[in-house]
Amino acid sequence: MIRAIIIEDETAAYQHLKNSIETNYSSQITIVGHETGVQKGIKLINDLHPQLVFLDIELQDGNGFEILDYFSNSSDFEVIFTTGLRDYKEKAMDYFAFYYLNKPIIEEQLITVIDKFIEKKSAFNSEKYTAFKNQLESGPKKISLTITNGHYIILDVDDIIYCEADGSYTHFFTTSNKNYTSSNNLKKVENILQHTSFFRIHRSTLLNLKHVLQYNNAGEIKLSNNKKLLVSSRNKTNFLRVLKLMNYTIH
C-alpha cells in the first residue's frame, strides 16, 4: 500500500481529490495525512514519511516549491503537483515531465497521472527539480536541456540557432558549433520557448529568427552558421509577416 499525503489549502479541492483517490485506488493508495500550509506540510512529511505527496503550488503561507526546497537534498517521496495555474509554470512542469494535475481535477486525468506513478514507482528527482527552478527563475532567457544519464545543461536562448526534431528527441544547434540532444520532443521545446524569437518553419524545425541572415522567395533561409533551411509552404505567409515586422530584407 502506497502511503500518501495531501497538502492543499482549499477544503473543497482537498475533499474532491481525497474522494477520487479513495474511489479509484482504495487497494493501492492510503491517504495518511493532510495539511494546508508550507511549515505544517514540512512537519507532516517529516512525521509520516510518505511515499507520495499531492502538493498544491499556491498555499496559505507561501508556495509548494518552498517545501521541495526544504527537502531538496533528502527527498525519498514522489510529488504530484496540483495547480490552478495556466502560465509559464505549467509549461515548465510539462517540459520537465513532472506529474501534475490541473484544477479543477478531472477524474480521467487523475487516473492517467497516478497510473504512471504506480507503473514507475519513482522518487522525486532533485537534480531535475533544480533545473526546473532555474528555468522558472530565468524565464525565456535560458533553457535547461536533459542530456545523458538524466543530467542537465543550461543554454542561453540567444545562443541557439535552430532546433530539429528527431522522433521524440530534439537536436539543438548553437553558436559555439556544439550540438546537444534533448529527450524532449519539439512540441515541448516550442512551448517552453514561447514569447521568444523562435519560429516553427517546418513540422520538424524550430529556428531562432535572430540568426536569420537571408531569405529568398524560393523559401530558402540562410542562418548565421551558414546553414540553409527551407520554410514549408504552409508556414511561408506567417514567416514573411514576422520577418517584415523584424525589418528583414527579403532577397
Image: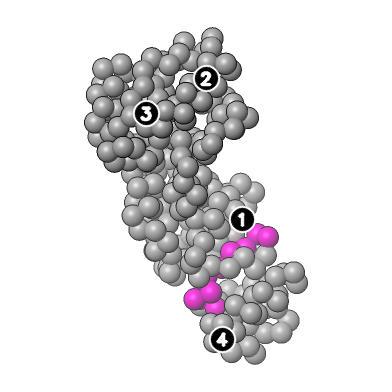
Stretch in magenta? 203-214
Could you tell me if the residues under marks 4 and 2 are in contact, i.e. CB atoms within 8 Å? no
Is the residue marked by circle 3 packed among few (<14), some (14-19), or many (20+) residues within 10 Å?
many
Q: Which residue is mark 2?
A: 19
Circles 2 and 3, Cβ within 8 Å, touching? The answer is no
Q: Earlier in the sequence, mark 4 or mark 2?
A: 2
Q: Which residue is more in the foreground, 217 or 192?
A: 192
Mark 1 highlights which residue? 165
The residue lying furthest to the right in this view is 233
Quickly name the residue at label 4. Answer: 248
Of tags 2 and 3, the one toward the viewer is: 2
N-terminal-most mark, 2 or 3: 3
Left or right: 236, with 102 as reference point:
right
**x then y, percent, for residue 66:** 28, 39
Vertical position of residue 82 compared to residue 178: above or below: above
Residue type pointed to by label 3: Ile
Which three-letter amino acid code belongs to the residue tagged 1? Ala
